[in-house]
């Protein structure tokens, strides 16, 4: 191989290595991908998403929600927030839209399937939004961002399938910050004996034969660097908890 060709190969390899290293060490960098939107007539999200949020999943974040493919991560990605912006300069704004993952789904090589409302918010103008929606699938770039609900504390929603005292299932609403909820403990408030719960689907945590009395739920928050923190709510779930009820944890998580 000629010397100039060797130099070209070396330079290409070096650029590739630098790009790979940057993608691994730059959590705030954008990743290139594609996004579609829900094809139905609903502007907001779905009430039957794989995360188990129900009707809440269609209205959280004002309806700016999305299904995810690989980013769903077997339910670990439920509740995570991403800044998504399309890359067509004729239609797209620099800011894009911030969406919450509430569902699992994949299209034509897409990482996101946005609600129609969120998809349109990537555009510069109303006319540009109509043009974007007509395309159906667009090139995008995205990055993980912190979820923020200034007027809401983390909230526990008891699933309708729950049956006190035999079976408890719940989802966690208003997940905040930029970390994943990787484990959940259910603790007795009298003797502080705790048990790890099962993630049965999406963001739904369950246990059979839950303890009697008021209950404390502890959440393990983990970030990409491997740092883990147990978060303990201020408020407990009362002894007479009922299916369908929601309970305010009394806390917010900023990071």
Image (cartoon, rainbow, N blue to C red):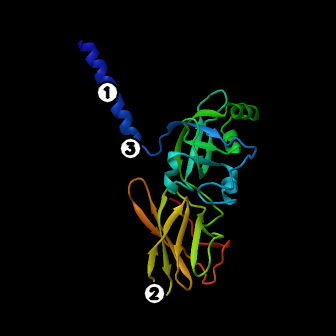
Mark 3 neighbour density, 10 Å: few (under 14) some (14–19) many (20 or more): few
From the image, tell me which residue sits under label 3.
Answer: 25
Pointer 2 residue: 191
Position in image of residue 108 (x %, y %)? 57, 35
**Residue 13: mark:** 1
Residue 153 coordinates in the image, percent (x, y)? 61, 67
* Circles 3 and 2 in contact, beta carbons < 8 Å: no
Q: Quadrant of residue 111?
A: top right
Residue 84 on image: x %, y % = 58, 41
Is 89 or 47 nearer to us in this picture?
47
| Residue furthest out toward the top | 2
Mark 2 neighbour class, 10 Å CA radius: few under 14, some 14 to 19, many 20 or more? few
Q: Quadrant of the N terminus?
A: top left
Secondary structure of residue under mark 3: helix
- At horizontal 28% and vertical 15% (from top left) the residue drawn is 5
At numbered mark 1, what does the secondary structure look like: helix, strand or loop?
A: helix
Q: Mark 1 or mark 3, which is nearer the start of the sequence?
A: 1
Report which quarter residue 243 is drawn in: bottom right
How much space separates mark 3 and mark 1, taking CA atoms? 18 Å
Relative horizontal placement of residue 92, taking residue 195 as reference (left or right)? right
* Quadrant of res 2: top left
Label 1 crowd (10 A; few <14 / some 14-19 / many >=20) = few
């Amino acid at each position: 191989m000629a010397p100039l060709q060797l130099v070209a190969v070396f330079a290409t390899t070096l650029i590739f290595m630098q790009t790979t290293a940057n993608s691994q060490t730059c959590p705030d960098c954008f990743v290139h991908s594609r996004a579609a939107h829900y094809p139905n007539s609903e502007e907001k999200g779905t009430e039957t998403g794989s995360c188990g949020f129900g009707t809440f999943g269609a209205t959280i974040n004002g309806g700016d929600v999305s299904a995810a493919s690989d980013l769903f991560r077997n339910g670990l990605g439920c509740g995570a927030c991403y800044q998504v912006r399309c890359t067509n300069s004729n239609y797209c704004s620099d800011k894009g839209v911030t969406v919450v993952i509430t569902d699992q789904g994949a299209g034509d090589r897409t990482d996101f399937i946005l609600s129609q409302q969120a998809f349109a918010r990537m555009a510069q103008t109303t006319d540009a939004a109509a043009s974007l929606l007509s395309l159906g699938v667009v090139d995008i770039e995205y990055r993980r961002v912190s979820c923020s609900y200034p007027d809401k504390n983390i909230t526990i929603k008891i699933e309708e399938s729950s049956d006190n005292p035999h079976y408890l299932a719940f989802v966690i609403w208003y997940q905040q910050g930029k970390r994943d909820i990787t484990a959940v403990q259910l603790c007795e408030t009298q003797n502080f004996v705790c048990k790890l719960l099962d993630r049965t689907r999406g963001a739904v945590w369950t246990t059979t034969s839950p303890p009697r009395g008021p209950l404390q739920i502890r959440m393990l928050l983990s970030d990409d660097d491997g740092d883990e923190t147990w978060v303990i709510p201020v408020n407990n779930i009362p002894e007479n908890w009922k299916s369908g009820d929601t309970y305010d944890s009394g806390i917010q998580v900023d990071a």
